[in-house]
């Protein structure tokens, strides 16, 4: 960018600017659009200065919304056309399907043109105009409009008055420009857009020359027989494909309607390949498959028991089941711990009671507790008899431990006294009862020998 600065009138010297901030660049001495923040300036080859203000942006947003409404209306009309063409293709009563299709398409085009011409957004778009001969022509008056916002790109005007109907003379000029050229000037149309432009000029020519038909079209606008056949074939292929897709959807709908609730639930869980296989089955095959799947699911279904109620994973869902299972695990652990504490307490009580009942009987506390537990499981009469017998046996065992002449008649160094001393020492050292210690001493070589000596006296 080049900026020219003058200090005062008549001063033509160049001056260097340092440390400045350019807040505005304008093509005029004093800008009139103070609200504009961004100004786009034309280059040397541009035709006009384009300025975009906040109000312009808001207007464009409103147009976008209106365009969406227009698209909605056009979508509805497209659906109506599709339904009409499907009906024609599938109806055996329509003999000349080609003629019927063309008529339907023509009606569609007329309805579409009516909607577009009556839509406010189109009128908004048409506010942009190209001035020719002192008249402002909207974009709709041209066959080629590559950029609706840039009138300089519009080509091949078709009307003599802005917004009017196609004019035969003006359309003839457009036809010539498309062909060998009008007065030597041949219009330049990109190859990708030419078919659409030709179609628009063709429609304008037929509308401007109401007393003529397609057979009278200029050569430039005529379709070759090959093009006509190709277009017809392409249209028929599309219609046939669309018809087949519709038939497939109808068949799918009928298939789903024939399923019962269990079959629908099973079908919904299948993969794409399995669904296709399921659709090919007959009614009996589907029934057998679903029953087998239900049985397998029931066999594989995980369950827990909570407060006496059996809960299935398939009934409550994986998330809820996982939570309930975790809670049940905690509950089971707490119950097991409580049961163990209770069992330990009961076992300790039995051991203490057994030791009191049979202090002189050989065996561990646990063994005696087991004996007592089995006796208590007997009927009352049998229980009393067993306890009486065990008590007598324990007392007899106690008497056998007393040495002869206890109370001063036996020798302190007798075998019996020595056995007793060894038993007491063993009991103190190992923290066991005298009876257990005595039994342990008897199992030693020394104890066995002393016992034999005590019996010999």
Image (cartoon, rainbow, N blue to C red):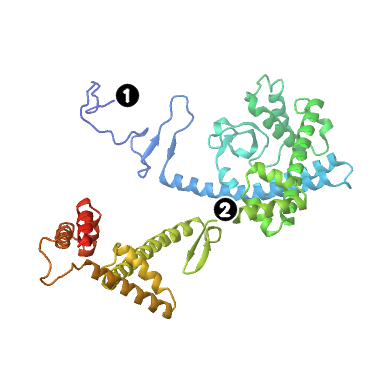
Which element is circle 2 on? helix
Q: Position of residue 291 (x, y in %)?
A: 68, 55
Query: Which mark is first along the chain, 1 or 2?
Result: 1
Furthest residue toward front:
457
The answer to whether 300 appears left or right of 52 in the picture is right
Q: Nearer the viewer, residue 47 or 111?
A: 111
Which element is circle 1 on? loop
Image quarter for residue 138?
Answer: top right
The answer to whether 233 appears left or right of 380 in the picture is right
The answer to whether 304 appears left or right of 103 in the picture is left
| Within-10-Å neighbours for mark 1: few <14, some 14–19, many 20+ | few
Q: Position of residue 412 (x, y in %)?
A: 10, 63
Q: Position of residue 305 (x, y in %)?
A: 49, 64
Res 300 label: 2
Question: Can you tell which of label 2 and label 1 is closer to the viewer?
Answer: 2
Q: How many marks?
A: 2
Question: Can you identify the residue that label 1 sits on?
Answer: 2
Q: Nearer the viewer, residue 164 or 279?
A: 279
Image quarter for residue 436?
Answer: bottom left
């Amino acid at each position: 960018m080049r900026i020219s600065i003058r200090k005062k009138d008549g001063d033509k010297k160049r001056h260097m600017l340092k440390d400045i901030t350019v807040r505005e660049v304008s093509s005029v001495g004093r800008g009139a659009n103070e609200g504009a923040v961004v100004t786009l300036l034309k280059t040397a080859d541009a035709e006009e200065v384009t300025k975009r203000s906040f109000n312009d942006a808001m207007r464009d947003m409103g147009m976008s919304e209106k365009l969406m409404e227009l698209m909605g209306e056009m979508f509805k009309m497209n659906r109506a056309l599709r339904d009409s063409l499907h009906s024609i293709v599938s109806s055996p009563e329509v003999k000349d399907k080609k003629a019927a299709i063309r008529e339907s398409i023509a009606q569609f085009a007329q309805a579409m043109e009516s909607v577009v011409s009556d839509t406010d957004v189109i009128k908004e778009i048409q506010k942009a105009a190209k001035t020719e001969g002192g008249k402002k022509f909207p974009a709709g008056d041209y066959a080629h409009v590559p950029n609706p916002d840039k009138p300089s790109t519009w080509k091949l005007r078709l009307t003599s008055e802005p917004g009017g109907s196609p004019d035969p003379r003006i359309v003839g000029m457009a036809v010539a420009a498309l062909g060998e050229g009008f007065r030597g000037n041949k219009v330049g149309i990109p190859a990708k857009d030419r078919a659409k432009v030709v179609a628009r000029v063709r429609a304008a020519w037929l509308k401007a020359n109401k007393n003529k038909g397609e057979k009278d079209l200029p050569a430039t606008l005529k379709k070759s027989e090959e093009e006509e056949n190709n277009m017809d074939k392409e249209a028929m292929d599309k219609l046939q494909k669309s018809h087949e897709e519709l038939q497939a959807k109808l068949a799918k709908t009928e298939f789903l309607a024939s399923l019962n609730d269990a079959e629908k639930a099973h079908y919904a869980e299948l993969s794409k390949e399995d669904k296709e296989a399921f659709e090919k089955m007959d009614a009996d095959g589907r029934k057998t498959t679903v029953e087998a799947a239900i049985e397998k699911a029931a066999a594989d279904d995980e369950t827990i028991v909570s407060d006496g109620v059996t809960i299935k994973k398939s009934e409550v869902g994986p998330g809820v089941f996982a939570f309930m299972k975790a809670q049940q695990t905690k509950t089971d652990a707490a119950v097991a711990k409580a049961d163990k504490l209770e069992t330990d307490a009961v076992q300790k009580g039995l051991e203490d009671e057994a030791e009191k009942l049979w202090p002189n009987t050989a065996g561990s506390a646990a063994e005696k507790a087991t004996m007592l537990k089995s006796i208590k499981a007997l009927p009352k009469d049998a229980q009393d008899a067993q306890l009486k017998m065990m008590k007598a046996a324990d007392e007899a065992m106690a008497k056998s431990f007393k040495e002869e002449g206890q109370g001063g008649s036996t020798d302190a160094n007798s075998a019996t006294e020595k056995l007793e001393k060894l038993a007491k020492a063993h009991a103190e050292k190992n923290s066991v009862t005298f009876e257990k210690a005595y039994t342990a001493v008897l199992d030693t070589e020394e104890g066995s020998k002393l016992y034999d000596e005590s019996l010999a006296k």
